C-alpha cells in the first residue's frame, strides 16, 4: 500500500471517529473541502477510504440484521439498511 493510501486511510478512520464524537454529519464533507484545496489527489484517496469504510459498515449492518432476523433476535432500528438492487460498483 502506498504512503498516500496509508495516510488517507488513517485520516479517514480519525475523521469518522471525530464525526461521531462531534455529532456533525457534515464533518466528512468539511474535511474533504479542506483537503481538496490543498491536494486533489489526497482528497480523492481520502474520499475513497471514507466510501469503502461506509460501504463496509452498511454491509455489516445488513448482515447483522439478516442474522438477527433469522435467529429471532431482530429489533426494529431507525437506521435499518436499505437494499438497492444493481446499485453501486
Image: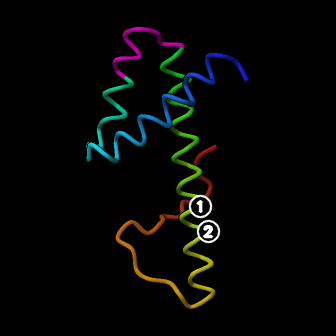
Residue displayed at 50% across by 37% down: 13
Vertical relation: 84 (above or below) 54: below
Q: Which residue is mark 1?
A: 60
Vertical relation: 67 (above or below) 60: below
Describe the element under mark 2 as helix, strand or loop: helix
The answer for how far apart the CA atoms under marks 2 and 1 are is 5 Å
Q: Position of residue 51 (x, y in %)?
A: 53, 39
The disc label shown at residue 75, or none: none
Part of the protein shown in magenta: 33-41
Quarter of the N terminus within the rendering:
top right
Apparent side of residue 76 relative to residue 61 in the rendered image (left or right): left
Among all residues in the image, which is located at the extreme left? 23
Question: How many marks can you see?
Answer: 2
Residue displayed at 29% across by 38% down: 26
Magenta stretch: includes residue 65? no
Number of other residues with Cα within 10 Å of mark 2, as a class: few under 14, some 14 to 19, many 20 or more: few
Residue displayed at 57% across by 81% down: 68
Which corner quadrant of the image does residue 25 belong to? top left
Describe the element under mark 1 as helix, strand or loop: helix
Q: Position of residue 24 (x, y in %)?
A: 26, 42
Q: Position of residue 64 (x, y in %)?
A: 58, 71
Number of other residues with Cα within 10 Å of mark 1, as a class: few under 14, some 14 to 19, many 20 or more: few
Q: Nearest the camera: 58 or 13?
A: 13
Q: Are marks 2 and 1 in contact (CB under 8 Å)?
A: yes
Q: Which residue is mark 2?
A: 63
Among all residues in the image, which is located at the extreme right? 1
Q: Position of residue 42 (x, y in %)?
A: 52, 16
Apparent side of residue 38 relative to residue 57 in the rendered image (left or right): left
Amino acid at each position: 500500500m502506498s504512503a498516500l493510501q496509508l495516510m488517507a486511510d488513517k485520516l479517514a478512520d480519525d475523521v469518522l471517529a471525530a464525526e461521531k464524537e462531534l455529532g456533525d454529519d457534515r464533518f466528512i464533507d468539511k474535511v474533504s473541502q479542506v483537503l481538496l484545496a490543498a491536494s486533489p489527489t489526497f482528497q480523492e484517496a481520502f474520499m475513497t477510504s471514507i466510501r469503502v469504510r461506509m460501504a463496509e459498515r452498511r454491509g455489516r449492518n445488513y448482515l447483522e440484521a439478516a442474522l438477527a432476523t433469522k435467529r429471532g433476535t431482530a429489533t426494529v432500528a431507525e437506521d435499518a439498511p436499505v437494499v438497492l438492487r444493481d446499485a453501486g460498483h
